[in-house]
Image (cartoon, coloured by chain):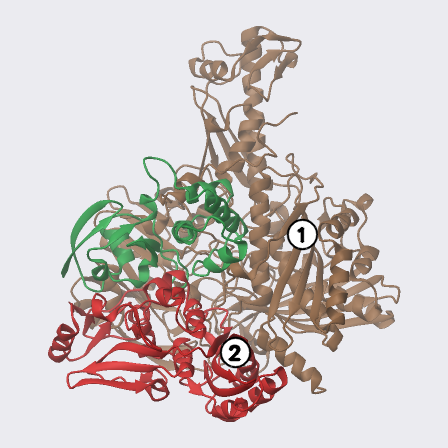
Amino acid sequence: MYPPKFDYYRANSIDEAFALMGQLGDAKLLAGGHSLIPALKLRLAAPSALIDIGRIGELKGISRNGSTATIGALTTHATVAAASDLPAALTEAAGWIGDPQVRNRGTVGGNIAHADPASDLPTVLTALGATMNMRGLNGARSVSADDFFIDLFMTALGEDEILTSVDVPVDGAGTAYAKLFNPASRYAIVGVAAKVSVSGGQCTSARVALGGLTPSAVRAPSVEAALVGKALTADNIAAAAAQVGGDLDDVMGDIHASEEYRRAMAPIYVQRAVSKAAERAG
Amino acid sequence: MSNKYIGESIKRVEDPRFIQGKGKYVANLSIPGMLHAAIKRSPYAHAVIKGIDTSKAEAMEGVVAVYVGQQMKDDGIGSLPCGFNPPDIKTAPHMPLAVDKVRHVGDGVAVVIAESPYIAYDALDLIDVQYEPLSAVIDPKKAAQPGAPQVHDEIPNNVSFHWPLGTREEINAVLASADKVIELDLVNQRLVPNAMEPRACVAQWDAFSDEMTIWTTSQNPHIIRLLLSLATMGLPENKLRVISPDVGGGFGSKIFHYAEEVIVPWASKQLGRPVKWVSTRSEAFVTDAHGRDHVTTAKLALKNDGTFLGLDVTTYANMGAYLSTFAPMIPTALYITLFSGLYKLPVIFGEAYGTMTHTVPVDAYRGAGRPEASYMLERLVDLAARELDMDPIELRRKNFIQPDEFPYQTPVAMIYDSGDYPKLFDSLEALGDYAGLKAKRDAARAEGRLVGIGISGCIEASGPAPSQVAVGLGAGVGLWESGVIRVHPTGKVSVMTGSHTHGQGHETAFAQIVADELGIPMEDVEIIHGDTGRTPFGLGTYGSRSASVGGTALAVSAGKVRDKMLKIAAHQLEVDVEDMVFDRTTGTMHVKGSPEQSKSFVDISVAALMANNLPEGVEPGLEETTFYDPSNFTFPNSAHIALIEIDRDTGQVSLLEYAAVDDVGKVINPMIVEGQLVGGIAQGVGQALWENCVYDEQGQLLSGSFMDYAMPRADGFPMLKVSRNETPSPTNPLGVKGAGEMGTIAATITVANGVMDALAPLGIRHIDIPHTPQRIWQAIQAQSNGH
Amino acid sequence: MQSITLTVNGKSYTRDVEPRMLLVDFIRNALGLTGTNIACDTSQCGACTIHMDGMAVKSCTVLAVQADGADITTIEGLATNGHLHPMQQAFWDQHGLQCGYCTPGMIMAAAKLVENNPGITEAEIRHGLEGNLCRCTGYQNIVKAVAQAAAAGS
């Protein structure tokens, strides 16, 4: 398949990108292109211009400041998957995106700005309590993952903004990602990320997020509430996981997994993710 | 008779070009001045075409022409034919571009010819087609019910044919008097072949010589040329050259004569320029003929001791929107005739209804009818074993045709050539460690895990076909094969075969045959195929026929070459030809008992050129042709076993172990045969666990890309153990049987039986394939909820 | 049109391309290197895998303009001085191909997979090939070939 015609501009800095965005009406940002180019090929998108931000050095790489890791928007999934000092849930999930070739080109920023409901990173970043950093002509702002993913392919990122980086807390909590793969696309039918802290044998904090089920990644507050204050025994985790149904509205269905099946899998994968996170919380 | 090459795992001679990116695929062809075609396709499953406005597309820069179906029809282009027509079949026209109505999503309505494929695709968006959508029918059984939307006026009630074998009265009597009748309703789901190379076609019209050359991704270029001449293009065959160069996999889907093979050459003739069309994968999903899609009711009658008494099967076979080239053959002559399996099954009644629906045409896909037969029969046998509380292998053994009963006439027309089924299963029990698997399963079950053993024993009729049988059943061509051996004066040999390789390794295996038959080095033998301009008429490659039919044609030609060379050598050595020996290890000819009185292969090659000292009545030159028509099919057979585990919580299936013993007769190249078996098994596992072509009720294809159609991947398999149990086929001098499809035929049912065995402790009797996690989970839920 | 300069198999090329031109089409049509195949529209099959700046990438999901300045190796450039790359040799030795269509992409992906991992396990190989589809071989001989090449230190 062949993309439709578009004009192409390369931005060598964020400022250049903003300048181009200002000049061009209906332009799209091109990072790794692994969400956008497939859409162009199938002619599901037809922007008049692309602004290639793929070479902007300041958007690449992972840095650490205290207990916060900052991941540049152009960092590839392969780089994240191979990082040694990021939460396990994140490296695990990054390593399960697509395939090695896709991970070599696909970027964290592109992935989350696209906000495919079956994508892995929105789920993980939501559970980790990550913060999305973006810049616009009017300056910079940050939005928590909880508020960033709004709906199917919809985020808080403005038309005139660029996602620059993601801040991920690295605080020693146990984290894990559990995924039921779509056998064809390898996206998540159900993806669950969990982050738990344990002190004195009891769970002191818990964040659990699910993707693949609903139009955008969602937290599971009932599960989280049921975990906090409890010992993370198998029974307690199972009991908490069983609460997840109440946290899920608008569960989707398709030829691979009906709404009923997805709902049934949710507690199982919550249980798997939380159990593993609990082990890692040690 | 010693062989230097036959029976050896010779590394493939075709591989150096493939591993270096030098494959000669149609999509790689570029001709100066070449234009590019793109086809506007229907988004509706069923609609009246009210009008097509191509003006905007035609006005686009870089667009050379836009054509619609009516223009082709007005120019005399004919309907794509069905080449297998059983008695009383009802057919309907299938125009390369739809004229009045579209009948499946993907049906072509117009073609753009442009300077680049990018422009051609841009122009598609500017073609305005007005449709009046109509309701559609998708299911092959529902299609035959009163009130179903009609696909063609010419085919009332959507039933194209009804093909019974046996008598209803006889089977009814058996069913009525049997101790037990095992009944099963099943669906053999629709599959998309998905050869990795999408179809492609390039055509070049030469107005100077009035000749058309067509490069196409075909398994059988001569059949395509014949149909182009006879039915669609109407050009004389001698003015048509069809070339199938390297073809990237077929699995049946590249047998058929497709619309693009008419549209592209026709456009080239209109414009006087070469035209190229390359399918996208998205198009492949909605235009390549699909496979399987049967809805079946089956009954197995047996005695309490497990003796089989009779089989009664009714199948509704989905033909799709049009009858593809060999479509009616699949659920009839290649399906019902295999219902006896490995067993003595005294009474069989089978019938198939071929019905039209608003879906992509369905035709042969790896196995073609035989996987459907094996799946049905071997599911019934497993259910019978469970009901009788017998070991499934014991029940099979009890009913086997015995080694001393060959040739064996089944009640469904076939005469099996050879086999030793008890030994086959002995080998399987050893290779797969049946006792060990049972211990593993039982231990796992004791822990509450869902683990099962899948077993199957399957038969295949390969190597189509005796032409008399094929034509008698309705085929429009005999199914023989050609083989030419041309010995050059230097002793090098060119071999022309009507068979075609698209992964099977003919360039290696056929060279092994010819080199051994002539006693010359393999390096001196070149295999030429896939070009109607360079090879005699041949029928091509499908139905696991290449070795047994095409290979035999070459072996027979080699024998003729040897005979002629011996005559010349005898004449020059001044002895009687009866006193001569052809040494097949060296290619020399010598006097019996006097090896020093000899002529080399090259000596005689030169002698045939010089022609100054030939025996009387012997012509110069060394070239022999054989058109070999087999006397029977060959009957590969198999015993496979698998160990399966199911995740009780999610329904996910893991294939833990797999072992297979196949009888594919004598083997020319064990490495290649093992590759065919393993690859075939993977494809069969794909049907059991992952692959599913799904339409919605409106006829929209929901699994129209690799994002939704789950292909087997490397991580879905353990290392498969494969072994062979050779019983040479007496049907051909090489003793070979087909090897290309046995793995696929056997693997689907093996894995499916394993899944059902794993679920047996829960009381689940049957789940249709593919055994996806969701389906298994639903069955477990239904069982635990007492449904 | 956009002017791009890139190195393919050690040779530098400068060409004008339409911005929408896919890298795979550029390689196949503009440069005539048809060993890199196309087998899907959805970045799934891996037939078009090449090496770009040292990494295996799917050239159907890269625009030619994005590859401006890149150093690219295709299947045609994998052998050196007439010697097959160990991965090519292994695919031949192990009968790791049948129709050959997925093979260039498979070899290119596999060559990167085993880089610096001579002891790669069967499970790692199977997982590492998740971006490449083959319809013929059932992957078994491909897995064996990759293991052979890894052991040979490719």
Q: Colour of chain C?
A: green
Q: Amino acid at mark 2?
A: Ala
Q: Secondary structure at mark 2?
A: helix
- Crowd tier of the residue under label 2, counting other residues whose Cα lies within 10 Å: few below 14, some 14–19, many 20 or above: many
Residue B420 visible, this angle: yes
Q: Amino acid at mark 1?
A: Ala
Which chain is indicated by disc 1? B
Instruction: Please tell me whether residue B562 is drawn above or below residue B747 in the rendered image.
Output: above
Expressed as whole percent of the image width and height from the top left, the position of residue B211 reads: 31, 44
Image quarter in which the N terminus of chain C is found: bottom left
Chain identifier for the brown-coloured part of the image: B
- Residue that mark 1 sits on: B660
Q: Nearer the viewer, mark 1 or mark 2?
A: 2
Is B705 situated left or right of B441 in this image? left
Q: Quadrant of residue B171?
A: bottom right
Instruction: Please tell me whether residue B387 is drawn above or below residue B257 in the rendered image.
Output: below
